[in-house]
Image: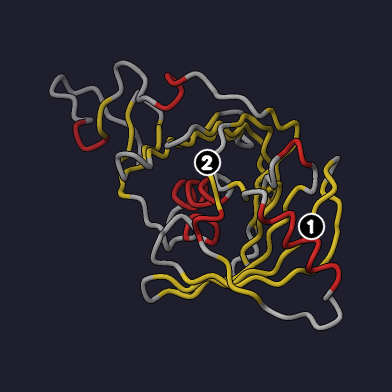
Amino acid sequence: MNRRYSLAALAMVCIGTAAPGWLSAAQAGRNNRAQATWSESKPSAFSREPFTADMTILGRQGKYHGTMYAGRNALRTDVRLTNGATASVIVRYDKGVEWILVPGRHYIEAPIDKSADLLSSLRDKAAHVEKRDLGPEKVGAYPCEKYRVKVSVRGHELSGWIWVSRARAMHGFVVKAQDQVSGDGVELSHIQLKAPHPSLFDLPAGYRPLREASHPSGTPGPAH
């Protein structure tokens, strides 16, 4: 998997926001933390509340900063790279595809792999999910409840941690998520619970699939 696709997978991590049931689970977890027991949770506990937020991708190769936009059935991340360029990924859950925008007004289209990362797997109705409350922990400006989660879906096993906002106004929003195996994670800040403009989730005008990026006139196409 190249870096663009790993960024796409990380972007998909934070589309889920926990339903208010997570808040009551947090209360119960605080009362029974000494036992550190696992409990089952349905993937349907995660909704798709629209939001806009600043984003920090925490990876083995360092930190990347950008913006995340989430709609009911779509997600977009604009990530600022170290060379000053911006890498954009649009995930369309309603179409089952993701688009990676590349230089030269082209895009790469790929199917969404719901088992590719931790929280995107929670969007799969076939997933079996277990969680364990690890107690309160603050993420940036947000008081959160930290959970250890394990997901089994379509022959894949995933595990990691999520930090769920304890603020009622945020409706159990997942502020941070980290995958156990890769160590990669996403942390959100300056979260605004409002719907982004729908045009952000469409391909920009004039963009073509990368496979069509031939130039009969002899002008070289984008570098690979």
Q: Is residue 26 above or below residue 155?
A: above
Point out the tag, 2 or 1, that comes first from the N-terminus.
2
Asked whether, in this view, residue 126 is left or right of residue 81, the answer is: left
In this rendered view, identify the residue nearer to me: 84 or 57.
Answer: 57
Amino acid type indicated by mark 2 = Arg
Q: Which mark is residue 157?
A: none
Total numbered labels: 2
x and y percent of residue 83 in the render?
60, 33
Residue linked to disc 1: 145
Residue linked to disc 2: 48
Say which residue appears at 15% left-offset and 19% top-offset: 217
x and y percent of residue 28 in the render?
79, 67
x and y percent of residue 108 in the render?
32, 39
Say which residue appears at 66% left-offset and 42% top-offset: 64
Say which residue appears at 86% left-offset and 71% top-offset: 31
Specify the farthest residue to the bottom: 35
Mark 2 packing: few (<14 Cα in 10 Å), some, or many (20+)?
A: some
x and y percent of residue 136 in the render?
85, 59
Mark 1 packing: few (<14 Cα in 10 Å), some, or many (20+)?
A: many
Q: Is residue 118 above or below residue 153?
A: above
